[in-house]
Amino acid sequence: MWRLRATSREPEDIDGQISEILGQLSDDLEVWRTIGQRYKVDLFCGLFMKNGNEGLSLSSASLHALAVRQIEIGFDIYGPGYEVQRSDAGTEP
């Protein structure tokens, strides 16, 4: 398993973080097709909300960049007061 991380940002900038991660990787879509045929490729996002009613949007450019690379995106959403270390996001509390 390979893991890449984006810099933590406040306020959130999920589009910038997606761009940061993809910017470290190949732009060659044929390479991505080959990888997608052989492996499961996903992008995991841990969202830490400060308030109970916050929103998040993904730009069409980010959605397109993920789709053409066959990258699935998943979210874990943590409400206010949830005690988890940001480095532990995606693991069992």
Image (cartoon, rainbow, N blue to C red):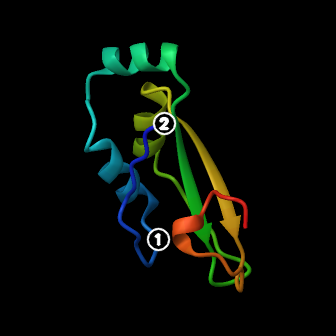
User: Is 73 left or right of 16, judged from the image as shown?
Assistant: right
Q: Residue at x 42, y 19 (%)?
A: 35
Residue at mark 1 to residue at mark 2: CA–CA distance: 26 Å
Say if 4 sits above or below 30 in the image.
below
Q: Residue type at mark 2? A: Met
Say if 54 sits above or below 41 in the image.
below
Circle number at residue 1? 2
In the structure shown, which secondary structural element does the residue marked by tag 2 occupy? loop
Could you say where residue 72 lies in the image, as x and y percent from the top left? 57, 35
Could you say where residue 45 lies in the image, as x and y percent from the top left? 55, 55
Residue position for label 1: 12
Q: How many marks?
A: 2
Say if 57 sits above or below 22 in the image.
below
Q: Quadrant of residue 16?
A: bottom left
Q: Residue type at mark 1? A: Glu
Circle number at residue 25? none
Q: Residue at x 56, y 27 (%)?
A: 40
Structural crowding at the residue carrying mark 1, measured as other residues with C-alpha within 10 Å and reported as few (<14), some (14–19) or many (≥20): few
Q: Earlier in the sequence, mark 1 or mark 2?
A: 2
Q: Residue at x 49, y 30 (%)?
A: 67
Structural crowding at the residue carrying mark 2, measured as other residues with C-alpha within 10 Å and reported as few (<14), some (14–19) or many (≥20): few
In the structure shown, which secondary structural element does the residue marked by tag 1 occupy? loop
Could you say where residue 76 lies in the image, as x and y percent from the top left? 67, 58
Q: Residue at x 39, y 49 (%)?
A: 4
Q: Quadrant of the C terminus?
A: bottom right
Q: Nearer the viewer, residue 62 or 9?
A: 9
